[in-house]
Image (cartoon, rainbow, N blue to C red):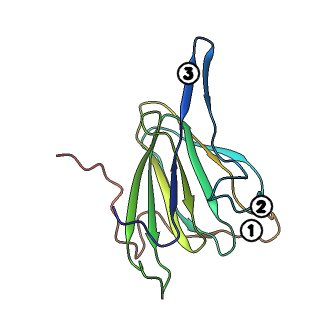
Amino acid sequence: MELIQGVKIKKLKVIPDERGRLMEMLRNDDDLFIKFGQVYLTTAYPGVVKAWHYHKKQIDNFIVVKGMMKVVLYDGREGSATFGKINEFFMGDYNPMLLQIPNGVFHGFKCISETEAMVINLPSEVYDYSTPDEYRVEPYDNDIPYDWERKDG
């Protein structure tokens, strides 16, 4: 898959032993590390879509730590080499990875597991409650050429 310009992924290594497991997510010596803003957890129940939004400044770093999510990106940045491109990522228990989402790229996700899925985000900026860097678009009624329905076959 050709990635949207500025999108980066890091396959995550899980180290199991008889006590449990360890999984490093993002280190400050990683090539894709930019800077630290904060860390937060967001969840979705089975079948729930949380979409679409983008940031003007913030860069997101998503890791699904429980369950499975379909994370979808849309490049609506005019002038981008990948303008109009869609990327889909199936992330979580069966595909541990960090997905770095550049500013200006619309993104959203859908829980595709049978139980609640959990996403940790390590954004580059601190959330500003007075003037949030978050620009939303309705999940279904918009100009983004994407259908959130399950694709069988």
Q: Position of residue 1 (x, y in %)?
A: 33, 61
Q: Is residue 37 left or right of residue 118?
A: right
**How many callouts does the rendering have?**
3
Tell me which numbered mark, 3 or 1, is placed earlier along the sequence. 3
* Disc 1 to disc 2, C-alpha distance: 6 Å
- Nearest the eye: 75 or 51: 75
Question: What residue do we see at 83% from left, 68% from top?
Answer: 130
* Disc 3 to disc 1, C-alpha distance: 39 Å
Residue on which disc 1 sits = 132
Q: Amino acid at mark 3?
A: Pro
Question: What residue do we see at 47% from left, 30% from top?
Answer: 115
> Element at badge 1?
loop
Residue on which disc 2 sits = 127
- Nearest the eye: 54 or 8: 8
Q: Amino acid at mark 1?
A: Pro
Residue on which disc 3 sits = 16
> Element at badge 2?
loop
Question: What residue do we see at 69% from left, 58% from top?
Answer: 123
Q: Position of residue 78 (x, y in %)?
A: 48, 86
